[in-house]
Amino acid sequence: MQIVILKNSAEVAEYGANIFIKQLQNRADSVLGLATGSTPLALYQGLIEASKANKISFKDVTTFNLDEYLGLEGTHPQSYRYFMNEQLFDHIDIDKANTFVPPGDAENPIQACDGYEAKIEAAGGIDIQLLGIGRNGHIGFNEPSSGLMSRTRVKTLTKATIEDNARFFGTDEYQPHLSITMGIGTILDARKVVLLATGENKADAILATVEGALTASCPASALQLHKNAVLVIDEAAASKLSDCEFYKHIESENQKLMARLGF
């Protein structure tokens, strides 16, 4: 894994956005895997600004989102389809017919999971998959105990995840306890994975992901198996790593090498 430790959340968002901007500048018809939550918001704003400045275009881009609450229609304000429209798709030149989110209102969610996998395959696979990480190490809605080679499926959310997400729902509003999520195996199929993490509350999860054992107890630890995984984290999220200065040194030397090779 490539570990990039930056000062704060603003630098993390800028670094992450630049990865996606370079991808679209190199390949206009890229297939992007996207994520929801508070962490990617600033990154999406960077992509919106780059699009409006004509640095990139989304006209030929296809997107696949990681997950969706089971039982919510796309028009529901707490659905991830609604989130993506509000935070990104409504502000860029993308054809929404080419933006895919797992169907939370599917009559047969099991079949819908298989169909989602088929759509990703038909699109040629995902070029870059964006990830956040939960306090318990979950990626997408792959909670602890998820199979490390799992595919898109229905998952039960842990109490910790439900509690973390409760702030988005009113006290009298229905909050789903089930989701449809890409599996860990699906995520690992992406040609590149970019995980963003900021804040001290993610430090334990980052420690387990980077320096812990490869285990279903920390789903994000599966990224240790990926040949092109980039973790972009701020100093607070990196605070429990054994030697942050060593990781910074590695990244500095890596950047020098890439510059010498013309990348």
Image: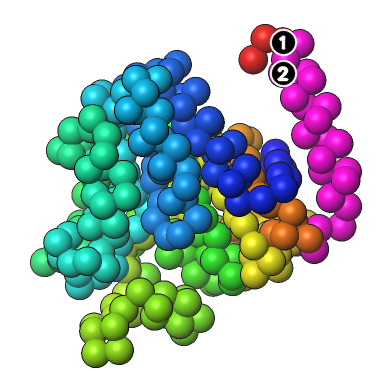
Disc marking residue 221: none
Query: What separation in Å lies between label 1 and label 2 (alpha carbons)?
Result: 5 Å
Do the CB atoms of the residues marked 1 and 2 lie less than 8 Å apart? Answer: yes
What's the residue at 72%, 48% (across, down)? 7
Which quadrant of the rendered structure holds the C terminus? top right
Element type at mark 2: helix
In the image, 94: left or right of 31? left
Residue for badge 1: 261
What's the residue at 40%, 20% (across, down)? 55
Q: Could you tell me residue 39's position as x and y percent?
A: 50, 55
What's the residue at 32%, 28% (across, down)? 52
Q: Could you tell me residue 118's position as x and y percent?
A: 26, 42
Which quadrant of the rendered structure holds the N terminus? top right
Residue 18 magenta-highlighted: no
Q: Quadrant of residue 238?
A: bottom right
The three-letter code of the residue at mark 2 reads Met
Q: Which residues are magenta?
A: 240-260
